[in-house]
Amino acid sequence: MPIAIKMPALSPTMEEGKLARWLVKVGDTVSSGDIMAEIETDKATMEFEAVDEGTILSIEVAEGTEGVKVGTVIAQLGAEGEAAAPAAATPVPEPAHAPDVAPEPAPVAAPEAPAVLISPKAKKLAEEWGLDITAIKGTGPNGRIVQSDVEGAKGSAPKAAPAASPAPATPAAPAAVSGARVIASPLAKRIAAERGVDLASVKGSGPNGRIVRADVENAPIGAAAPASAASAAANVPTVDMAAETRALLDDRIPHSVEKLSGMRKTIARRLAQSMSEAPHIYLTVDVQLDKLLKLRGELNAVLEKEGVKLSVNDMLVKALGKALVAVPECNVTFAGNEMIRYARADISVAVSIPGGLITPIVQDANGRSLASIATAMKDLGSRAKEGKLQPGEYQGGTASISNMGMMGIKHFTAVINPPQSTILAVGAGEKRPWVMSDGSLGVANVMTVTGSFDHRAVDGADGARLMSAFRELVESPLGLVV
């Protein structure tokens, strides 16, 4: 009996995902642990492993499909030669899309046609080429139709009988057009939509002028029928817009419209949630960096032979971790009726990636060595940009840090990453006039750091204590290596 392969929940909060890529095809044999597909969640692209062994009987969801709900059947697995369930061997004519020439009517009380034995690949090709599988003679076991039978039938597909009063054909009209209707296979329609090809301008090579996959792939991208030229010049949106989008659109301005990615939707939802639910309080300090920069240079000289290079941000992660343990009132989550207090500091570090932002987590930042943090951040940052993080590596954390100093930003405020209560926004280090420890006026490397706190959970005085502890650790950095 076939086994239904369903869209997995790759994280506790996942409700839907994008089937980014199939790594198997119909007819392939898989074993437990084999990678079957890559599935894109709102934050990462993850590999989906087979848990049973067998042969891929059918692919139910095409790669590239977005918004696939968890639990949706995406493929079927079974023994070789076994039919996929539910059986769908008998072709169903397309309702509301009658062919150009009416097929021969069937008797009203005709008995149900026997099921056609056909391999999954042969069935896929027949559907793509618009062939009637009931008219194909199978050469496989028990008359089963195989791929070679379909390929042989393509070139000899019977032509439909002409109508009683045939109208003269218009040479300039594509063969697939009948009035305002275009006849195309479902696969051809999907590819045309992805490539921006106007099917009205494509001439079909299938039976009765039906447009098939090859016709669309050979058509120029963005090809448009002459009648649509005016609308193309009028900035017609490239996607179906929601009513609220259309209401905001100003057609006088050249524009394009694109669908939001799952990541961007999640960012928008979580940040709106944070700003609407958590009353933010902001506390800012200026921090001198000279001693930290000197220590970093000395440590890197020692660690170079081990292939480790500390960044300023690695040291700031450690400073925040130790500060949170010193001021545990800020290492909390507000839970409505309870307060969750954490015994260690897991720091979420904001990393910019194509299309959005992700926060890989340095676990036990307060207890790890600087070299361990640097090694972890190098690995997490690299895999974050490739979309290869596991959910446990970016979901959770007790507090966050966002550093925009490398972009030259002097000062900014960050939005709290729910359900956390604390995030530090780190600006660029720069030379500024500074009152030295002996009271003289000099020049020092200084950066501005702003903490955002959820005022439901963190009092202003506790937030101030955290900012003070963080500053002391950065300005006396030997505390980071003991």
Image: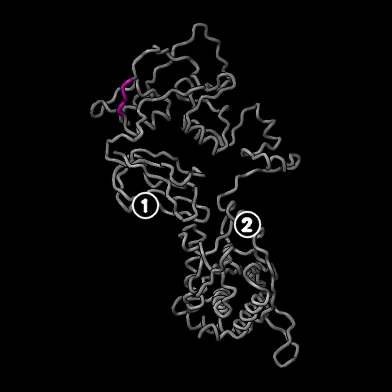
Q: Observer-nearest residue: 273 or 211?
A: 273
Q: Observer-nearest residue: 283 or 154?
A: 283
Q: Residue at x 46, y 56 (%)?
A: 11
> What is the count of numbered marks?
2
Residue 150's place in the image compared with 442, above or below, is: above
Q: Quadrant of the N terminus?
A: top left
Identify the amino acid type marked 2. Answer: Gln
Q: Residue at x 60, y 57 (%)?
A: 270
> Would residue 271 be found to the left or right of residue 325 on screen?
right
Q: How is the image coloured?
A: one colour
Span colored in magenta: 113-117
Displayed quadrant of residue 404: bottom right
Few, some or many residues within 10 Å of mark 2 (<14, 14–19, 20+)? some
Nearest-to-viewer mark from 1 and 2: 2
Identify the amino acid type marked 1. Answer: Glu
Q: Main secondary structure of the magenta part?
A: loop
> Would residue 278 be found to the left or right of residue 389 on screen?
right
Q: Badge 2 is on which residue?
A: 273
> Would residue 208 be found to the left or right of residue 271 on screen?
left
- How far apart are the two marked residues, 1 and 2, measured between alpha carbons? 34 Å
Residue 95 x/y as whole percent: 48, 22
Q: Observer-nearest residue: 392 or 304?
A: 392
Q: Badge 1 is on which residue?
A: 49
Q: Residue at x 63, y 39 (%)?
A: 238
Residue 458 x/y as whole percent: 63, 71
Residue 323's place in the image compared with 252, above or below, is: below
